[in-house]
Amino acid sequence: MKRIFKAAGVFISCIAAFSCNLQAQNGFTVKVKVSNPNNYTMLIAYKGENGYQIDTAYTMQNGYRVYQGNYPGIGMVSFIVRNPGNMIRSGGGFIPGPGLQFVARNGATITISGDAEKINLATVSSDDKETKAYEVFRTKNKVWADELFEMDKERYARKTDDSDKPPADKDPQKRKSLLEQQGKWARDFVKKYPNTYAAIEVFASYALELSDAEQAVEFAKLPATYKNSELGKVIQEKINGTAATALGNPAIVFSQPGFDGKQVDLAALRGKVVLIDFWGSWCVPCRASFPHLKELYAKYKSKGFEIVGIAHESGEKDQQQKAWADAVTKDQISWLNILNDADKNNIVKKYGVVAFPTKILVDRNGVIQGRYMGDQDGEFDKKLHELLSDDGNQVPMSGSTQSFGATGSGSTQPSGTGAKTVDIPAGAKLKKTSTAQPVKKD
């Protein structure tokens, strides 16, 4: 009997062989042959009709593990090997290694061949033109993504303290070169294959590096059919959200119970300089930034500085609540904090946040003066000091801050393309490995 688990861990089963066979006939098929399986759990994960699903069941046919799935439309599927060596643990979180993703839709048969120890470097083949198109992109990108992850593993292995922040790269120019190659190839691919679903997936991997205006213009060029896909709608929502929260616009107000049960009302904080910090318990870079935020909070709170943390968690409501509460308690966060409610008041969506950490700086008049993603402490600190040093009658300053599209250090971590950016975990979507991580899937 085929077993399907929701991401939250809820068990679902096919109650009759007929229903399972029907799914196999109407769905997609994944055939896997790998060396060095080492008793690793292997599975396919994707967004199905009933939410994000993880399928561990397979049959053996002619030496292949054969998985069956059912995709309502077209989108990204991940083949996951639960190999502890393919992640970096640090503090209370972890950085996942590059995964193996492919485009799938019902009717397609996909074959995966490779080494379970390096599943991200495996080969994907199919007669489906959309699967083939994305594999063209992945064939080059997977090599660069693997090198970047190995560099991160080396950095974290040299850590000598308990902080989540690793030492600098031994060869920073190598990282810069790899990221530049990834970025150029992604843009070249979209130009060469504009009428494929793969183009929209790849566009999502570098959209954060574009200005808000550039994102809108480039997205408009993509095929209407795929702009109406689930990913296309997420990107459009992100574009709408960042347009509404661009520098110089009033911050979108929200009011919600905080960690201590008291109401956190952004409008009531008018007159203070406010940092809205989007983070997650699962996000290593987010939590690595807390020591610095604590220093700033202690230094400037008496001068009218306030921080409002917006935690984005995955899973069922009780799981989200526990993960958030455990992180706030363990990290001894003393500023205002609320848990994002994706159903009733999705602040993450309203602000167009697709990568973590994202920090939005609001002046005393409730106007957005800065948006920072990843490691941009220097620019953020400078702007914060500036806002606290005068009467708050600020206007956005070009050059002193960067919009959401900027990557700062150049190392954001998407998912899906080896980089993606959207509302998902195995994926979401965003890229590379390091100072910012993609949104986790619910």
Image (tube, grey):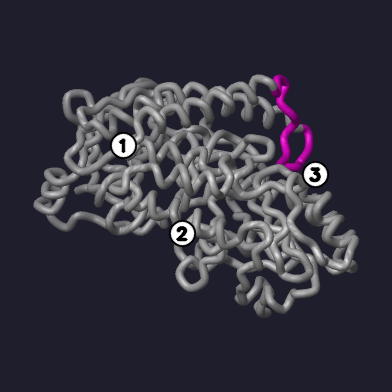
Q: Earlier in the sequence, mark 2 or mark 1?
A: 1
Question: Three-letter amino acid code at disc 3?
Answer: Gly
Q: Which mark is residue 276?
A: none
Element under disc 1 = loop
Question: Three-letter amino acid code at disc 1?
Answer: Asn
Element under disc 3 = helix
- Up/down of 315 relative to 428, above or below: below
Q: CA distance from mark 1 to mark 3?
A: 41 Å
Q: Earlier in the sequence, mark 1 or mark 3?
A: 1
- Up/down of 171 relative to 263, above or below: above
Q: Nearer the viewer, mark 2 or mark 1?
A: 1
Mark 1 neighbour class, 10 Å CA radius: few under 14, some 14 to 19, many 20 or more: some
Question: Where on the picture, by quarter, is residue 375?
Answer: top right
- Up/down of 144 relative to 229, above or below: above
Q: Where residue 56 sits in the image (x, y, percent)? A: 31, 43
Q: Would you name the residue on which mark 2 appears?
A: 315
Q: Nearer the viewer, mark 1 or mark 3?
A: 1
Residues drawn in magenta:
160-172
Tell me the residue at 80%/74% (across/down). 271
Q: Where residue 410 sits in the image (x, y, percent)? A: 64, 35
Nearer-the-camera pick, 109 or 261: 109
Quadrant of the image containing the C terminus: bottom left
Labels 2 & 3 near each other (Cβ < 8 A): no
Q: Is 224 situated left or right of 157 in this image?
A: left
Q: Which mark is residue 195?
A: 1
Q: Would you name the residue on which mark 3 appears?
A: 378
Mark 2 neighbour class, 10 Å CA radius: few under 14, some 14 to 19, many 20 or more: some
Q: Where residue 20 sits in the image (x, y, percent)? A: 15, 49
Q: Main secondary structure of the magenta part?
A: loop
